[in-house]
Image: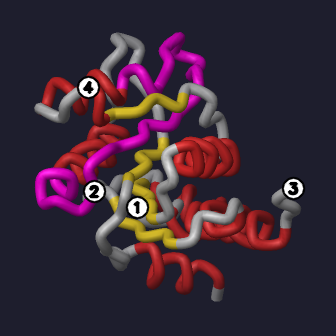
């Protein structure tokens, strides 16, 4: 079934030497701190950055109902951990996975880059990889955040609808 495919694919890192990583946004807490899920994505990006998989990180998110720009919160988190501020690029208009893919492709084209590593939750990655591939980024790697919670069951079920939608949708 679709759920098995998403699990099988999402729970496997597809690592390679990328020009840039993109961390997809998630909830920011009411106090302005990264949620556990978002922190796990950022921690994964930080570890891979430290291991030399990429030299820059795009933080892509929207303006959440909690009142914070996810991308700004994400950048602060990474800079606090030790990533140089100029190596963390903001995409504050990443309201959807599709928006993040489009915005990342544009930022990459402006800098003549061709390889991206997408970082998110495991259940989100199959759909994200489709979106990033469809916006003409030649090479898409991925890695999942090492964080699991009971809500994943709901998220996984939701992706069984989201993945086919992203697969067949228009990317004009």
User: Which dot marks residue 132?
Assistant: none
User: In the depicted view, which residue is nearer to us: 57 or 81?
Assistant: 57
Which is in the foreground here, disc 1 or disc 2? 2
User: Which dot marks residue 172?
Assistant: 3
**How far apart in space, not on screen, are marks 2 and 3 (Cα)?**
28 Å
Residue 136 locus on image (x, y percent): 67, 65
User: In the depicted view, which residue is nearer to us: 90 or 76?
Assistant: 90
Determine which residue is flagged by label 4.
85
Q: Residue 24: within the magenta? A: no
Residue 165 locus on image (x, y percent): 80, 65
Q: How many marks?
A: 4
Determine which quarter of the picture holds residue 122: bottom left
Which is in the foreground here, disc 1 or disc 4? 4
Q: Examine the rendering and report whether any part of residue 157 can be seen.
A: no
Above/below status of 162 relative to 65 = below
Q: Which residues are magenta?
A: 47-73
Q: Earlier in the sequence, mark 2 or mark 4?
A: 2
């Amino acid at each position: 079934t679709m759920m098995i495919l998403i699990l099988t694919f999402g729970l496997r890192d597809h690592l390679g030497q990328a020009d840039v990583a993109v961390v997809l946004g998630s909830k920011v807490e009411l106090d302005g701190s990264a949620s556990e899920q978002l922190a796990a994505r950022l921690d994964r990006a930080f570890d891979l950055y430290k291991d030399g998989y990429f030299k820059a990180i795009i933080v892509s998110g929207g303006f959440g109902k909690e009142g914070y720009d996810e991308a700004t919160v994400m950048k602060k988190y990474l800079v606090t951990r030790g990533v140089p501020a100029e190596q963390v690029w903001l995409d504050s208009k990443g309201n959807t996975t599709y928006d993040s893919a489009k915005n990342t492709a544009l930022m990459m084209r402006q800098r003549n880059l061709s390889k991206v590593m997408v970082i998110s939750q495991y259940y989100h990655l199959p759909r994200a990889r489709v979106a990033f591939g469809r916006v003409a980024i030649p090479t898409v790697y991925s890695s999942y955040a090492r964080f699991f919670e009971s809500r994943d069951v709901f998220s996984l079920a939701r992706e069984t609808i989201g993945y086919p939608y992203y697969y067949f949708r228009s990317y004009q």
